[in-house]
Amino acid sequence: MTAYLVKGVSVLGAAPTDLLIRDGVVAEVGADLTAPGATVVDAAGLVALPGLVDLHTHLREPGREDAETVESGSRAAALGGYTAVCAMANTSPVADTAGVVEQVWRLGREAGLVDVQPIGAVTVGLAGQHLAELGAMADSAARVRIFSDDGHCVADPRLMRRALEYVKAFDGIIAQHAEEPRLTEGAQMHEGEVSTRLGLTGWPAVAEEAIIARDVLLAEHVGSRLHVCHVSTAGSVEVLRQAKARGVRVTAEVTPHHLLLTDVRAETYDPVYKVNPPLRTDADVAALRAALTDGVIDIIATDHAPHAVEDKECEWAYARPGMLGLETALSIALDVLGPRWDLIAERMSRTPARIAGLDGHGVDPAPGAPANLTLVDPAARRTVDPAELASRSRNTPYAGMTLPGRIVATFLRGEPTVLDGKATK
Ligand code: DOR
Ligand code: ZN
């Protein structure tokens, strides 16, 4: 195993130091380290962060390998500074059995670029009728702890209650895609002034807020852990704030796109801006940013949602919802939060690792820590070119935008998955 001597790096914004990475761990931290035989990485001007952890990634395998594979999505993740991703269950077949989650887990190990932790479906086939084999998935080699029907809401309150009760036995989590389906029938974008003007059917904020309100009450009643996916409205933030103040075991995520973009993008009719939940208003963006800073929203999760060209380059109404996220998330976070490295580490690495129970991830670079880390050049600016992305899909909403920050290197258990801004395999 090669050792790596990272010279002159700023750990989370502190004064420059050297890091020796050997045998999968950060072996030493200090000034003027020497290590004969080690590969030297010149990290002057770079910031070291614990490897990023994404709680919400769509890898599309099995079933839509034309849009993404476990390997291509893992490569995109590593290039984005990630060392672990949680793979959503809305594959084809759905990840609702021990067999499918083990397949995804094994493909992740074979790719070896990030740790891929499968999420299991809550209901069979995501159909919202019958609970999936939660226990069998938890006991499988993939050791599933997070369950989600993401893409669909677990709308039936009795089923949601039973799911919360079931996972309590192994401290599991239900991650809810909060969308009251009766309030979003035919919806194409956020319901508001812009949807009225464009004549598109709206997706009202209350469709999200009503489910979150119901689910925090159910989680409180049962005493289980609830995670709310892609929170997108100011009203949702207030529901979560009250629930947390009461001590409900609830965590919440926001996506990079909901922190940056608004529903006015729909005026272009470019389906690259179609996403679920939809882009909201300036007031929602402001509330989400404030909640991310004050901790009502716990983490940034990408909801990386690759889609093939034919599913995106078509009429708005026929396009699939979703956007790429893994290769741009850190840049958006830097843009939104500024160089607040401790906050970025908290929201993008430590807390998601803790929620998902991913041992060895979310640990700051320090002597003895597992060498899962990423090196960022905060001074670099990059113009996003969809053709340069490692994802198999091209549906980034940031094409042509110039964003701060560049991932220079990522290490997974002491081995570089990215060096000089390029994937090592
Ligand atoms: O925009 C979205 N895309 N929202 C979801 O909930 C699912 C995702 C997908 O799988 O494409
Ligand atoms: Zn979702």
Image: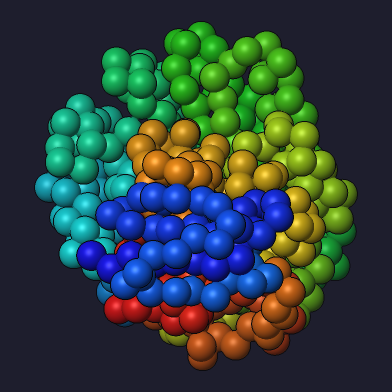
Depicted 132 relative to depicted 103: above or below: above
Q: Position of residue 342 (x, y in %)?
A: 68, 45
Q: Is residue 56 left or right of residue 89?
A: right
Q: How is the image coloured?
A: rainbow
Quarter residue 193 falls in:
bottom right
Residue 244: image location, x then y, percent: 67, 20
Q: Residue at x 39, y 65 (%)?
A: 35
The part of the image, by quadrant, that contains residue 395 is bottom right
Query: Would residue 322 be seen by someone viewing this image from the given angle?
Result: no
110 displayed left or right of 183:
left
The extreme bottom residue here reads 387
Which of the two residues, 46 or 124, is positioned nearer the viewer here?
A: 46
- Quadrant where the N terminus lies? bottom left
Residue drawn where x is 81% and y is 68% of the image: 264
In this rendering, the answer to whether 386 lies above or below 108 is: below
Q: Is residue 108 above or below residue 144?
A: below
Q: How many marks?
A: 0
Q: Position of residue 14 (x, y in %)?
A: 70, 52
Q: Residue at x 77, y 34 (%)?
A: 294
- Locate the C terminus by quadrant: bottom left
Residue 257 is left or right of residue 131, and the answer is: right
Q: Residue at x 47, y 11 (%)?
A: 223
User: From the viewer's perspective, is residue 320 above or below residue 205?
Assistant: below
Q: Work out which residue is located at the far left of the displayed protein and give it.
A: 99
- The reply to whether residue 47 is in sight is yes
